[in-house]
Amino acid sequence: QVQLVESGGGLVQAGGSLRLSCAFSGSIFSSNAMGWYRQAPGKQREWLSTITSGGSTNYADSAKGRFAISRDNAKEMVYLQMNSLKPEDTAVYYCVASSLGKMYWGPGTQVTVSS
């Protein structure tokens, strides 16, 4: 069973940076596409970015130019580097793994950006 655990969230001032990490276990990491979503209070969950098993990346418009996804297959980790953070980036951030049509979610990590 795939398990995901996010870390790296916290409180940061507007304009600051955070790096989220996600630890993967329970399957073959390198065969999974990985991604990040977020959910702000009172809003629907929003897709942010995906990185395929081959390393190709895609970003939502809200993440382009400010966020960068990466993965380390040897460490079975995926990362989300977030720069130039804004108060509207405040949300719970979730790591997602996808393989063979199944999606697995981590419990999330809170990111709060103060103005």
Image (cartoon, rainbow, N blue to C red):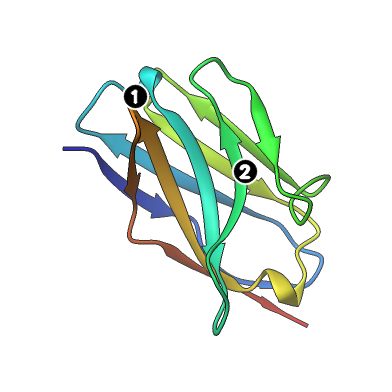
Q: Residue furthest left?
A: 1
Q: Position of residue 12 (x, y in %)?
A: 66, 71
9 lies above or below 33: below
Q: Mark 2 touching mark 1, by CB under 8 A?
A: no
Q: Residue 64: image x %, image y %?
A: 79, 46
Q: Which mark is residue 29?
A: 1
Q: Amino acid at mark 2?
A: Ser
How would you rate the neighbour count of disc 1 (Cα within 10 Å): few for under 14, some for 14-19, many for 20 or more?
Answer: many
Task: Answer above or below: position of 56 versus 87.
Answer: above
Q: Nearer the viewer, mark 2 or mark 1?
A: 2
Q: How many marks?
A: 2
Question: Residue 111, position in %: x, y?
Answer: 56, 69
Q: Identify which residue is drawn at 53% across, 24% down.
A: 52
Please state, as top left, top right, bottom left or bottom right, where the N terminus lies in the image.
Answer: top left
Residue 31, percent from left and from top: 37, 18
Location of residue 99 (image quadrant): top left
- Mark 2 nearby-residue class (10 Å; few <14, some 14–19, many ≥20): many
**Cα distance, mark 2 to mark 1?**
17 Å
Closer to us: 97 or 74: 97
Q: Residue at x 83, y 45 (%)?
A: 65
Question: Which residue is disc 2 drawn over?
Answer: 49
Q: Is 13 on the left or on the right of 49, as rendered?
A: right
| Element carrying mark 2 | strand
Q: Give above or below for 74 relative to 34.
A: above
Quarter where residue 41 is shown: bottom right
Q: Specify the quadrant that holds the C terminus.
A: bottom right
In this rendering, is residue 79 above or below 91? above
> Helix or strand or loop: what does disc 1 sit on?
helix
Quadrant position of residue 30? top left
Q: Is 14 in front, or is 60?
A: 60
Q: Which of marks 1 and 2 precedes in the sequence?
A: 1
